[in-house]
Image (cartoon, rainbow, N blue to C red):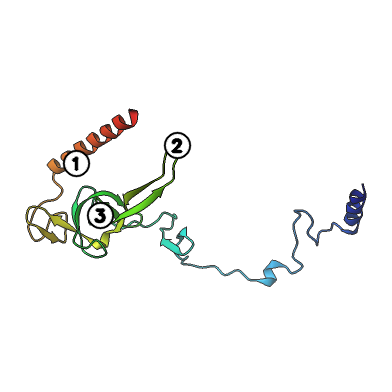
């Protein structure tokens, strides 16, 4: 009871007026805003940046969507790593991430991941996962000629076409077969 009366007495000392702020009411500025800071109109607004991480900003279009750059490698291409720890390794692109211009290559750039046990009786495990590599660190590779080359969707040095209808059908069938195997394994 004593605390309640103390609280009521403290509220009587506070005055609720138009010039002060009290429990969510607006605080009105004594200086008119037009005199305090004149507003300057900008003809060319600056580019919008999307916030990815605290220290990393990505350039965006005026509609706030990130600017995506076209990559020279696609899903299913055979590539050779030209720089970094895995320099010289050859593999197939399993995933391309256009947001960061990175690619995931089969059996290249393996990282260890420590998995916690999900159930009480199950032990934890250490697994190897493929981490992404920046697309500038890889070049397209020809298995037939054993040559790396720059590309305009065909190998410049050999003239070999990369995007053929036959190859895309093979990749699509392999992906469908892999998905059915994964579904069958998860069902059992």
Residue placed farthest to the top in the image? 188
Instruction: Give the residue number, with chain letter if any, for mark 2.
Output: 121
SS category of the residue bearing label 2: loop
C-alpha span from label 2 to label 3: 33 Å
Instruction: Estimate the x, y position of residue 75 in percent, counting from the top left.
Output: 24, 48
Q: In the image, which is nearer the foreground, mark 2 or mark 3?
A: 2
SS category of the residue bearing label 3: loop
SS category of the residue bearing label 1: helix
> Does residue 116 lie above or below 48 as drawn?
above
- How crowded pointer 2 is (Cα within 10 Å; few <14, some 14-19, many 20+) is rated as few
Which of the two discs, 2 and 3, labels the residue nearer the N terminus? 3
- How crowded pointer 3 is (Cα within 10 Å; few <14, some 14-19, many 20+) is rated as many
Q: In the image, which is nearer the foreground, mark 1 or mark 2?
A: 2
Please tell me which residue lies in front, 73 or 40.
73
Residue drawn at point x = 88 percent, y = 54 percent: 11
Instruction: Estimate the x, y position of residue 181 in percent, counting from the top left.
Output: 26, 33
User: Answer yes or no: do the residues labelled 1 and 2 have beta carbons within 8 Å?
Assistant: no
Please tell me which residue lies in front, 91 or 112.
112
Which of the two discs, 1 and 3, labels the residue nearer the N terminus? 3
Q: Quadrant of residue 67?
A: bottom left
Instruction: Give the residue number, with chain letter if any, for mark 1.
Output: 171
Residue drawn at point x = 8 percent, y = 53 percent: 160
User: Answer yes or no: do the residues labelled 2 and 3 have beta carbons within 8 Å?
Assistant: no
Residue drawn at point x = 44 percent, y = 45 percent: 116
Instruction: Give the residue number, with chain letter if any, for mark 3.
Output: 108
C-alpha span from label 1 to label 2: 40 Å
- How crowded pointer 1 is (Cα within 10 Å; few <14, some 14-19, many 20+) is rated as some
User: Answer yes or no: do the residues labelled 1 and 3 have beta carbons within 8 Å?
Assistant: no
C-alpha span from label 1 to label 3: 20 Å
């Amino acid at each position: 009871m004593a605390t309640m009366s103390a609280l009521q007495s403290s509220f009587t000392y506070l005055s609720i007026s138009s010039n002060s702020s009290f429990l969510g009411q607006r605080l009105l500025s004594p200086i008119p805003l037009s005199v305090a800071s004149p507003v300057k109109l900008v003809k060319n607004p600056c580019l919008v940046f999307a916030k990815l991480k605290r220290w990393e900003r990505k350039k965006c279009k005026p509609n706030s969507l990130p600017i995506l750059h076209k990559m020279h490698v696609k899903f299913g291409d055979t590539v050779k790593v030209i720089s970094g720890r895995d320099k010289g390794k050859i593999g197939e692109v399993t995933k391309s991430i256009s947001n960061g211009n990175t690619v995931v290559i089969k059996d290249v750039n393996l990282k260890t991941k420590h998995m916690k046990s999900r159930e009480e009786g199950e032990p934890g495990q250490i697994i190897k996962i493929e981490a992404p590599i920046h697309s500038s660190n890889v070049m397209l590779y020809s298995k037939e000629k054993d040559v790396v080359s720059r590309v305009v969707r065909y190998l410049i040095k050999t003239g070999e076409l990369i995007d053929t209808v036959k190859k895309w059908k093979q990749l699509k069938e392999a992906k469908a077969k892999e998905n059915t195997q994964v579904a069958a394994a998860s069902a059992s």
